[in-house]
Each structure stands twice: as C-alpha cells, then as structure tokens.
Amino acid sequence: MTTKVIRKSWGSRLGDSIKGILFGLILFIGSFVLLWGNEGEAGRKFMELTDVSLAAVEVASETIREGNEGSLVHTTGKATTPNVLVDPVFELSAQAIRLRRSVEMYQWRENQSRETRTRLGGGEETVITYSHETVWSGNLINSSGFEDPSPERVNPAAMPYDDWSAVASQVNLGSFSLDDALVRGMNFYESLPPRQVTLPENAQTSGQYIYIGQNPASPAVGDTRITFQIVPESNVSVIAQQRNAILTPWRSSRQSNFFIIRQGNLTLEQMIQDAEDAVRTLAWILRGVGWLVMFIGLNMIFRPLSVIGDVIPFLGRLVGGGIAIAAFLVSAILSLITIGVAWVFVRPMIGIPLLILAGVLLGLQIARGIQSKKQAAPEPVAPPAQ
C-alpha cells in the first residue's frame, strides 16, 4: 500500500472552478434534453403497448391460420431446435438455442481511495492511497499501467482464450419458425457443466468450470476458469407478427420493430404488464440520472463561490453546503416541471399533478425566502417620547 499527495493552490483551484462553469452549463442544459427525451420515449412505449394490447390476436402455436397473415399475434409453446451447437475450441456440444463461453483470469487489480482536505488560505491537499488485490476478471487488466507497479504484481499480457457464442439457425415454436431477432432476444441462459470436452494441457474440470492452473482451491495469477451457458429448449410466450409461418418483429404505428419473447407460459395481459413495468422502471432510473446531472451541473456553475469561501475552510464548507442545498431544490423543481410538461401532452392526469407538485415546492421556497428576509430585517426604532 502506497500513498501520493497532490497539492493545489487556491488560485489554481479557483481557475479550475471557473473553467468548470462551461461544463456545468453543458450538463445543466443536457439534463433537460435527457429528461424530456426520456419522458417522450416512455410515453411512446406506453402508447405502443396500448396498441399491442388492442391489436394482438390469440393463436395456438400448433396451427397456422392464413387469416392471421400479417397480424400481430400472441402465442405460447415450446421453443425447439434441431441444431447442435459446438464450441470450436473445447468441442463441448449441446442441442440448444444459444451457447456461450465465458473466460475469466485471475489477475492483480489496483484500487485507490482519495481523501481531500482544504487548508487555511484556500489550498487543497488530496491524499491518494493505492492498494492491490487479486480478482477473477473477464477483462484483461494492464498491470503496467498501475500507479504503483511492482515486479511481484505483473499480469499476463493476453487472455488465453476469448469469449465466444453461437446461435441456432433454426428455432421452432410449434408450427412456427422464429425470426433471428426473436432468437437473439432469448436470453434465458442457464449453466452447462463441462462434459465430454477436450481439455488443454494443465486443465481440469472443477464444478461448473474448466480450470487451467494447478489448484482451483488456491488460484495463482494467470490461472483461468471457463464456464459455459445455454439457452435450452423451453416453453416461451411470444408477441410478434405472423408472416409466412415465421414469427417476426411487428412494424408498429410508432415506427419501431416490436416483439416480446419471455420464458414460460404467460398470458397477453401478463406480458403487457411486465413490459409496462420494465418501461416504468427504466423511466424512473433515467429521471434520477437526469436530476443528478442537473444537480451536478448547478454545483459546478456555482463552485467558484465555495472556492472563494475556502480561504477560510469553515466558511467554504458553509457556502458549499448552501450551494448543494439550493442546487438540490432547484434541480428537483426544474426536473418535476420538465417531466410534468412532457406528460401533459401524453397523459394529462400524470403531467398536471407533477406540475402542481413543482408549483407547491416553488411556492414553499419563495415563502421561506420572504420569511427569512423579514426575520433578518431590523425592527423599527420608536422615536423618543417628547
């Protein structure tokens, strides 16, 4: 474990913070683009799912009806394939819809932790502590780029094997065939223990792995473990377009290639509900990201004020805390307004309450500011009695 100390003068910090104003403005403006675009995309997807629920026709996978040609259909059944997929290196084979190989190597990794202190006069001191550990990683870690290199901590220059995957060329669902896009949408992977494989030198099977090294219980740097996973033949539920006995993506009125494929026997209503839940979850994640980007942008815009205050560290912390609180409230209000306006055009029953909430928060902040000014104003002095 080693440490490195980086010192910055007050002038250098102030210059950096002033330069950061431009980047802060970019983040601030970009947050509106992200929030608006996210709400528009979420609204489009919700409307698309409404279209799907109205247009989809229930069909049996065992029988193809010509009258449903070109229609959006919902069906369930067992997805099967006549193909046998074979790993070209280890010759592991499986009758499966998808097969993939994942490779990990035991390597050194450098970690760092930072502690920053502000000194009297506005200067800043950052202490960086470097530590090292060995981990299993699917990516090659370049030990020559370590801040604290050592001949005792050197990783191999290359992975011994690459990740690999294969997809069945023919997948059937009852009397239907599945389009390649639907097949690649089947990510229901499960582990496949290595069996009847060709082992390289110094390799052995250990549980779910092919292990290349001396002792799986005590791995050394450079040891490698390889796992296999398959998407097996299994029951699936599909919403897609019927076209020439093939289930293929549906070109929706929203101009997207739409399909859903899930493992298990699910009703149309269950699949639509699951899809809506996924859209809702992603929308909330991106709302949080949009708010965070706006919050960071505002902090960067007003960062020079806290750096100026850092001439006296206690004062700088007070100013920085005040900026953070103000940025939190402003970004929350502006995010709500952006989201609300976007939804007013799609679902007013969602957009209007959000705008009302933003208005209430804004009103509370204005009222609080007025009250603070009244409390800070000096009381009038009564004239002396005559």
Image: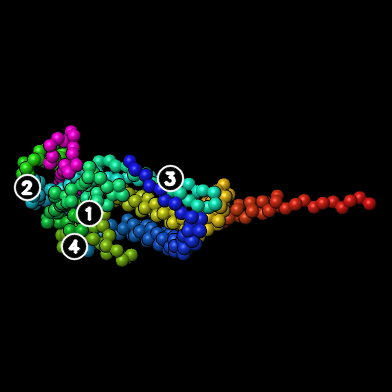
Which amino acid, mark 3?
A: Glu
Tell me: 158 left or right of 334. left
Pointer 1 with pointer 4, Cβ within 8 A: no
Q: Secondary structure at mark 2?
A: loop
Q: Secondary structure at mark 3?
A: strand
Task: Indicate yes or no whether the magenta region holds residue 320.
Answer: no
> Which residue is identified by label 4?
243
Give the alpha-carbon distance from disc 2 to disc 1, as whole Å: 25 Å
The reply, left or right, for residue 23 in relation to residue 162 is right
Marks 2 and 4: CB-CB under 8 Å?
no
Which residue appears at 34% of the width and 51% of the height?
Answer: 278
Which residue occupies 48% across, 51% down? 124
User: Which stretch appears magenta?
Assistant: 212-236
Q: Amino acid at mark 4?
A: Arg
| 337, 198: nearer the viewer | 198
218 inside magenta stretch: yes
Give the residue furthest to the right.
Answer: 386
Q: Residue 383 location, x and y as percent?
A: 87, 52
Q: Which residue is mark 2?
A: 91
Circle 1 crowding by C-alpha within 10 Å: few under 14, some 14–19, many from 20: few
Q: Which mark is residue 185?
A: 1
Residue 205, image quadrant: top left
Q: In percent of the image, x 33 and y 41: which residue is there? A: 1
Which residue is more in the foreground, 261 or 99?
A: 99
Report how far apart the C-alphas of labels 1 and 3 lie in the structure: 45 Å
Residue visible at 26% across and 57% down?
A: 259
N-terminal of the pair, mark 3 or mark 2, is: 2
Tell me which label, 4 or 3, sits earlier in the chain.
Answer: 3
Cα distance, mark 2 to mark 4?
A: 36 Å
Report the front residue among 128 and 367: 128
